[in-house]
Amino acid sequence: MDIVFLTFILILSIFLGFELISKVPATLHTPLMSGANAISGITLAGAFISAGIANSEMANILGAIAVGMATINVVGGYMVTDRMLAMFKSKTGAKK
Amino acid sequence: MSLDLIANLAYIVSAIFFIYGLKMLGSPATARKGNGLSAIGMLIAVVAGLTDQGIVSYEYIVIGLIVGALIGSVSARLVEMTSMPEMVALFNGSGGAASLLVGWAALYGGGDAAPVSTFIAVTVILAILIGGVTVTGSLLAYGKLSEKIGSGAIVFTGQRVVNSLLLAGLIGSSVMLAMNPSPDSVWFYSVLGLSLLLGIMAVIPIGGADMPVVISLLNSYSGIAACAAGFAIGNNILIVAGSLVGASGMILTTIMCKAMNRSLSNVLFSGFGAVKQGKAVEGEVKPISVEDAYYILEAAGNVCFVPGYGMAVAQAQHVVKELGELLEKNGCEVTYAIHPVAGRMPGHMNVLLAEADVPYEQLLEMDEINPRIEQVDVAIVIGANDVVNPSARNDPDSPIYGMPIINVDKAKTVFVLKRSMASGFSGVENPLFFNENTRMLFGDAKSSIGGVVSEFGSS
């Protein structure tokens, strides 16, 4: 794909990321971090191609490990974030 | 419509989910839904990724998915809330490893086995480099956080020289590899090895109290690594999602550094133990018994808890919450003041108190509590030290001078719960303990507070 085009996406996403996160209250720093961490497991979508490509056994093996690692990151990250967020209760919620 | 186009459209949809998800993570009321949205985005991206036409065999993919999902879900379910920092570090490390491996695999070329271009080679090297640093850095952070290895800063003479040589070697090997990209090249192994080594060297000089910075920085790296891997294989969702994570991690890192009044380079390159010492403090501490603490608390109208890493170690969050409830029943106003770098990761204390069912409205940030700290009758410091050290305000010689702190010394009375008189993690003396209005409650925080709670029960 076109390098300039990809770089364009990169720059816009970085700015977007800064905008999105800059106003998060301290209470949510940990869930935010582990939630973002789960997103970084997006490498998974790219690891498939390495794991399933035809030309090299070695690339397949590396890709398979990458798929496994990224899945740990994704599944674990989302679940642990959800577990944490389930505990955050507001005053009205906690009193029932 | 080609499959490729559909996949790319799906990536756009998943990017929207990620963006909304992150946005909703910004408020406690919507955070859980936001995380769910971002998970849906991930699912869409994963399904789209599976349709890639270059994939000819699915065996390896299925195996990887099943094994990874098992490990991830089991560990996410079993982990204790107090071990959350090291868990996050481990997940981070696995994400970094995945990006490294994708970069490595990309060196074997695309489906047509054509040689990789220089641009691809550069991005592959970046993926390997940043991924490698993330892997070993996270593993080391895990070791330090779980105290499997000493959590102190390791500083040795010549560290800077070693690191500079390491960096020079890394740059040199990278250039050589970029000129002739091949997975069999000796330069490849050199880049791989040196990157992994760099991750270790980057984290060893950083001590336990600086861990919030390291964790959020590594988080940022794992995003950047995914981004580089995205460039290497020309996948735009990796670039979008990776840079979102990279940017958010950077912001958290900056917030953490500000909360310690230190620059990022200061945290990264100077072990805290090596800094000059402030004035020695002289005076006498005034210990207090559990019973006397109870009498003071019973009469108090406004109590503020200030938790630190010690609360996590003692697992005292539930009993703290119990005491908070008893005090509220007694007509007392109860708040929890949380310093941004209390604990071992950003927001560590908030998670623990949330686990104990403390409503998030009662958790105050430093800037909220400080203007009204003078109205607080009793400030109860639980296992926090540096974040309440008044030297940061009034002793220019102190290594932590200038760091914003919670001004508990201005409260009418301060209880400090502490195991012993040892100084805090940074090794800096804390004059707070010797103040006129400070009372020391020695012992394990959990049993001390438990003692006060049972005093309430028996009266």
Image (cartoon, coloured by chain):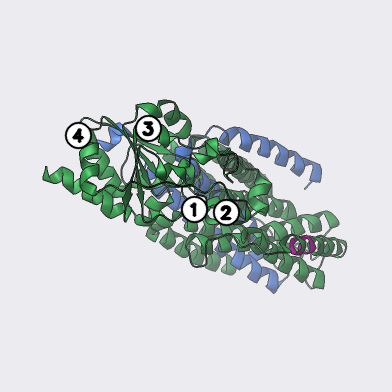
Chain colours: A blue, B green
B317 lies above or below A92: below
Give the residue pinned by disc 1: A77
Q: Chain of mark 4?
A: B
Give the residue pinned by disc 3: B411
Disc 2 + disc 4, Cβ < 8 Å: no
Tell me if B51 is positioned left or right of B118 in this view: left
Give the residue pinned by disc 4: B329
- Residue kind at label 4, given as amino acid type: Lys
Which stretch did the figure color magenta?
B162-167
Disc 1 + disc 2, Cβ < 8 Å: yes
**Which image quarter is the C terminus of chain B in?**
top left
- Residue kind at label 3, given as amino acid type: Ala
**Marks 2 and 4, how far apart in space?**
46 Å
**Which image quarter is the N terminus of chain B in?**
top right
Secondary-structure class at tag 1? helix
Tell me if B311 is positioned left or right of B99 in this view: left
